[in-house]
Amino acid sequence: MGVTKSEIFTDEQNTIAKIAKVLGHPARIAIIQHLLKIESCICGDLVNEIGLAQPTISQHLKELKNVGIIKGNIEGTSVCYCIDNNNWKTIQTTLLSLFSSSNNTENCCG
Amino acid sequence: MGVTKSEIFTDEQNTIAKIAKVLGHPARIAIIQHLLKIESCICGDLVNEIGLAQPTISQHLKELKNVGIIKGNIEGTSVCYCIDNNNWKTIQTTLLSLFSSSNNTENCCG
DNA sequence: ATACTTAATCGTAATATTGCAATAATACAA
DNA sequence: TTGTATTATTGCAATATTACGATTAAGTAT
């Protein structure tokens, strides 16, 4: 069916999955890394930086924006995109929560 | 086209994306959380715990196994699945590396 | 051997994702 | 206004993902 049965999972599970899903494409990782490095960006730079067509980059930017990882400001003809630092921290915390119950104990799988 | 152009990205970007992609489904998050909680598991439990059909769970387990998050031991008629603690730690480190260059500086998007 | 249990695999339908050409929209410049 | 530059949207083709019924495989029990 291709459709995820979100309703049977907890909010936390859906939230973690939603964030991870957006991070689940190398182009979006590349965009994030680039934005983190230069701290601000014009979309056109990304089209040159990453080897994908402009509409494709635009689409990836939209998804990053949807989950709040980046935000954009219109600056004349171009758009300035950058990491939303507050949300970025929240996302880090959310992802870390998945690892918090981790431990070293050996289990049945040896 | 539905096919990711992995070849134009760095190994690091592809690795992070691959891990994140597997974490990008609430059923797989639920499975991980369950395994972390009880520290060992028989697959049948998961079918009851999570509300998905047995083949679907089996498929999700396979993907988790592919990226090394879990491992399984055959125990008689059933299979014991659990978190691969070493890989799980590596995965945590890999994902966290994405956040290492994060900072507080205000940028052009205010 | 036969029946039962458990998990993997196969096949398939429905839906989602990725990527891009073409086009539209927006802001600025001459 | 007309042209130019930049980004968003639309439409579409190719492929991937999700889910599950049916079946298979492999072990256990009777």
Image (spheres, coloured by chain):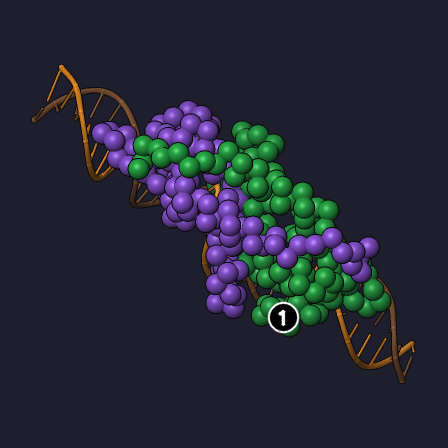
Chain colours: A purple, B green, C orange, D brown
Viewer-proximal residue among A103 and A9: A103
* Residue drawn at 56 percent across, 54 percent down: A97
Image x and y of residue B105, in percent: 39, 34
A12 is higher (above) or lower (below) than D11: below
Residue D15: percent from left, percent from top: 55, 43
Mark 1 closeness class: few <14, some 14–19, many ≥20 residues within 10 Å: few
Q: Is residue A43 above or below residue A96?
A: above
Where disc 1 sits, the SS reads helix
Horizontal and vertical percent position of residue A108: 80, 60
Q: On the rendered image, what quadrant is the C terminus of chain B found in?
A: top left
Can you see residue B101? yes
For badge 1, the amino acid type reads Glu
Q: Which image quadrant is residue B82 in? A: bottom right
The chain to which mark 1 is attached is: B
Q: Is B36 placed above or below C30 here? A: below
Q: Of all residues shown, which one is farthest toward the front?
A: B104
Left or right: residue D20 versus residue B80 is left
Q: Residue at x 56, y 46 (%)?
A: B20
* Residue B72 appears in the figure: no
Circle 1 sits on which residue? B49
Judged left or right of residue D21, residue A25 is left
